[in-house]
Amino acid sequence: MRLITYIGLVVRRVWSKRGILIGSLLGATLVTALLAIVPLYEASVQAVDLLFTVRGATSDSVDVTAFSTYTDYFATGADSNRELVNTSADELLAKWYPERLERTQSREFVVIPLSVDWYGQAEAWREALDQAIEDELDPEEWPQPQYPAPPREPTTARIFTSPTLTDHLTVVAGEIPSELPNLVRDPVQPVQLVLGSDLAATMSVGVGDQFLLRPFSGFQYIFELIEVAAIVEPVDPGDKLWGIDRPGSMFYMEQANFDFWMTAQSVPAESDAWLRPARGYVGTTATQRWIMGFDPETMVIEDLNPVRNRIAEFRADVSRVSGGAVAANSFLPGLLDKFDLRSVVIGAPILAILALVVGGALYFLIYTAALTLEREGPEMALLRTRGASTWQTVGIHLAQSLVIAAIAAVVAPFVARWLVGITGRVPPLSDLTGGEPLKVAQRRPLQPFLIGGAALTFLSMGLAIIPFARRRVLELRSLAARPGGKSVWQRYNLDLFAIALSLVVLFQISQRGFINFSGDEAKLDPLAIVFPVLLLFTGALILLRILPWMLRIIGWVMTKSRSMSFALPGWHLGRNPIPYGRLALLVWLTTGLGAFALTYANTLESSFADRASFATGADVRVVNEGAGFLEPPIGTTGAAVLRTTGAPRNVRSRQAEVLAVRPADFAEVVKWRGDFGAAPQTLFGYLRPEGVAPDVGVELPVDATEFSIDGVVIPRSWADQVALGTREPNPDMRLMMKVFDARGQVWTMQADQDLLDESWQTVTVDLSTGLNIGYPRDPVPPLSIHAVWVERSNPTGGNVIGGESLLVRNFRAETATGPVQLDEAFEELTTLNGFGRFRDVDAGEAASAYFAEIPAGESTPTSAIREASPLFATGTAQRWALPGARTRVNPAVPQLRRDPDPINVLLDVEVAAQAGIEVGGATTFSIGGVIMDAELVGYIDQVPSMTDERTSGRMVTDLDGLSPHLNGLASWSYNTALARIEAPGELWIETDDTDAAIRQINAQLPESDPPDALFSIKANEAEVSSRPVQVGLVAILFVGAAVSVVLALAGVTSYVLLAVSRRTREMGVLRALGFGRAGVAATFAVEQVAVLGLGALIGTIGGIALMRGMLPFLQLGETAVEIRPAIRLAVAWPILLLYLGVVGILLIGSVIWATRRVSATRMSEVLREVER
Amino acid sequence: MSEPIIDCSSLIKIHKQGNLEVVALHGLDFAMSRGEFISVVGKSGAGKSTLLRILAGLDVPSAGKVSVAGVSLTSISPRDLTKHYRRRVGFLWQDFSRNLLPYLKVMQNVELPMLLSGVGTRERRRRAKELLEATGLHNQSFSTIHTLSGGQQQRLALCVALAGDPELLLADEPTGELDTETSLEIYELLRRLNQEGLSIMVVTHDVALAKRTDRVVRLADGKMVAQGTGDSYPVTLDAGGAVTLPRDLLLAAGIEHEAGAKLTPDGILLHRKEEQ
């Protein structure tokens, strides 16, 4: 009964003090709720992050793929594996992988045009063979080769099939064959094949056209006559069925047809021109692949481990049952591992910040509890005089604390859920949730956190009574009237000890980092969580130490004022500044947390922008083959960039990432941060010390429209020609040129007609176009002829050169004002690969060669006849002599070429040191697989977009200097398949309107061939900054800062109310001395505001300093990889000042509200108080 | 003389205020018998309240001896001090609102000391009712404090002070904030309680009320300078034979600027000067 009475007493007490205890309840609820937030927020943000992660991942990263590679494809094996994969996937993966696709791709097949009469050759071979058999010749004397096998040609493509092939294709022409061929009835029928439209365009074939197709590798006799049955286009080129290949550039067969033709089909040998007893592509290498498409919407946080386990089971299952024939893989487990790691890494700041907020809230609790106790001093004294023992007094307070803690524990889960939910409405998390409350997830029980929170708050409030427990009645009575003195910490200099200890711990943490890796597992260092709290604690102790001195100084300054409203508070502050410590500390905590939150958010935002800029390089970066040649959108600046790898040759262990740029353009568009090094104009300017582009060949006049030469192929003798047949020995030769235009586009151009061995010809090269396909624009003058060569114009089935010699002269450019002679300029071109150049030979040499041998029955022509020959010319010419054959050793065409100059490079210090070169030093480099000399002209540290983790160094060089090295070497134009151009694959754009720039870029590209990648800072920033864990962190900080303002308001109001009641006598005296109400209130307000102002100033500095202190911990990014570029402190001064202004207004408002009592109190009451 | 309930011997109390030491009691020798009703008077700073607080156990003397009901307060343990509060003394502060817990009702306030002392519920309720009836507050038993008048609150405070059935009631200016009529009511109540055996010591500035006690003790500079019965006011003669009388005494006697002195068998009678 007595207990109930006690409880009743406590409850009445709590209820009666609800006004003052509401602050304690608020703080207790907040502390408990914040602890409960840990599991809720962790799970909720992780849930969002997980969804974000799997949604944002490319399908390659999340799909499960299984594959089986056959060196000799056979349908039954493929069927068996299909059944295995389907069964296992249905059983294990169906929940997350509802979509399943299968495709089978062969290795490359070679296209052999029927320009050569292969069937004729086969017939001739059969006849020769029959004849040899009839002649009973020894088999060694039979016709050679054994088969007239079609050679390999450059055009290759794969054969593709899928059980659902027709669902993914649109027929452009013809019809996809669905029936299997009947080789018994019709053994000579061609293989009906479907072509992708791109491939058909490249091969220039249509429905009904025929060609031979043979595997790239395999027996010579395995080839088939193909007939184009249909031309198709993919329904969706982005369909994951196609994989890495371009879907428009393949052969297609329906699955049944594929199975049929990839198996040996017996036919009567006589039915085949080559006497083969079987048809079909026996021994075809093919890969059967299954793609299990991941559905991110099915993934929930609880599936983290199950999905990993099922994938592992699936992999093991298919491998075991198939005897290793089927392998399966998925990057999803790795992605989820990274997600786990990120949760730990990002969890650290979240927990640390939560700890910070909890620490602040705990301080507020203790502060409020102490304030409450001070106000309750007279009541405690009364209880004591009424016979309450020390324990009873303490017990009543503890019971009161218990009631508050219990209420807090009951309310906290709802508050926690509400707070977690509301973060979804707070920017920037609201961007992800669409402004909806964050969906609260829970993976761990809340009870331990609630009990912990309740215990913590109970102790914090309960412990506050300890200093008061043993005080005498009179001391207790005076608590409400007299401010406290020095804290225990300062009285015994414990604060100095604690500060030293904290600094040691902080140093330790800074050395150890906050993530410990044991093996592959990352664990959070528990010390890291208390790191901000330690900082806070240390800061608070330091503040309490120095604050009195600062207040004395401020007080002294204020006393110099003539206004008593300033001078009086100054005196008061200077006389006894110690009691203001708690008030200042509260404001310090509030503004500190606010300043920290805002600075954290801004720093993170700034880092997002920096990271996005660094990853993108410029406002927009287009990556596509030849993207550097695209026209920069109107109103923008563009810079072509070629990205490759390379390194000094003596640095074998490293491959540096290489950017080749045009210095001036690049410096203008690159997003450069001051700490990357010298200004980009200066740094990249080193690549072109003279400021002009390197000389890459014979520069043509700007208005040149054509280039012409006169020439003739030196013929075989008249006698030889008569013997061998017309013109066959010395074929027509085509003049080819490699030309660089002003944009760096490398053009392969050819003359309008061939040089013949019949007469001198003037051949002309049209400079307005070239053979290259895919260039977005025509050649841009001025052009430079970099290389010149000649080759046979129709090389089908044979060599492109055969020891020909030509006479050439009169190199000239046709311009509007007439021809411009270039013979002299051509002298700078040098010979290469066995190209023979003989100057000043007799121009009549061709005629001389022709008439050198006269056929039998013919007479030697007279000189007049000889000079009348079209082969004859007077004067001199150059003779070009070609080697007898192309060699394997040097596949490049024999040519005249401008030797590229050594290039200038910028290297990172580490690579330069490894290569042993310093600025001004030169060495041999290998860049893009080409060896060249280069001089080191400067060092680079970080260059935007150079983030390739596979490389271990950075290099920047001049694009126009590098390009001739990479592209200048002319290669054969065999079958018009031009050598691949190492073109700048990126266009960096500086623009104010990203979207418009992207639209214009897309407009320049065919709709069917969008750019490989299109980066923009805008998109990158959105992607980087929308990581839920990061934005969640900011959101919770903002919520914490907002809550801290509320707590501060409550705390300051309580403090001021107490201070007002304590100093009523003083105010009464002032009133009695003639001070007006407003004057007294102003005096009091000025005093409090001075303390608040100082607290806010220190808090702001402290918050920013805390953020500065945390920077090293944030350098480790979300995936525990160091962030590039390094995070820099970014203080958002306008927002910070706005925040301080709002907080200041609120706090000053609360001070004025609390001091209103001073002005509201009647003089008689004040004087009566004075008399007491 | 019966056994004294209060016995002070050479009692000294020095208050420290920073570096300044103020002697509040200067070797006070004083005793009070059981059942006595005395008032302590004196100027501000004479040591009245200090004496009362020491006797209540709220403060400790710097030197000398003091005992209440035979228990020395000079070196009392915290446990005995609590007993002192519970059993021996009841204390009444001047500010009646500070004698009561505002969040408790009338009855609960009275019951509180007994609750703290461990008195059973039934006994608590009985005793509380008895006290409230004695003070005329039984009709307000379940009223809240703020509905009571000043006099009622002080009567209630008296109930609370007496709830533990103390041997001694100490009251610091119990009527300081009350009007004359209510003050008289309180004194009548105190007198009645005294007649029932309760020893009472009040500190007061009110001469008229002081006269209603059995004995008036006058303190000055921390010493007892005079004492007398309730109808005689103790005064001090200086070396020159001058007497300083309290103004309120003079006003009560209707003496303003001039007075007459007459020798009587008991001493000298100061009276209003007859008008000419």
Image: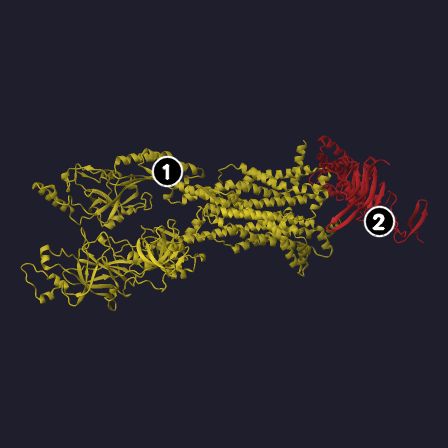
Residue A146: x %, y % from top left: 15, 43
**Number of marks in picture:** 2
Of residue A118 and residue B54, the one placed in the foreground of this image is: B54
Secondary structure beneath dot 1 equals loop
Left or right: A760 with respect to A531? Answer: left
Q: Residue at x 58, y 50 (%)?
A: A539
State left or right for residue A1051 relative to residue A126: right
Specify the chain shown as red: B
> Most extreme residue toward the left, as rendered?
A857
- Is residue A912 rendered to the left or right of residue B10? left
- Measured as percent of width and height from the top left, residue A62 is found at 38, 42
Q: Position of residue A1010 (x, y in %)?
A: 33, 51
Amino acid carrying mark 1 in the image: Pro
Residue A618 visible in the snapshot = no
Task: Write the residue at 40% across / 38% down.
Answer: A308
Above or below: residue A194 compared with residue A880: above
Letter of the chain in yellow: A
Q: Is residue B56 visible?
A: yes
SS at circle 2: helix
Mark linked to residue B248:
2
Q: Report whether B220 appears left or right of A444.
A: right
Which residue is the site of mark 1? A98
Q: CA distance from mark 2 to mark 1?
A: 104 Å
**Disc 2 + disc 1, Cβ < 8 Å:** no
Indicate whether A271 appears above or below A1139: above
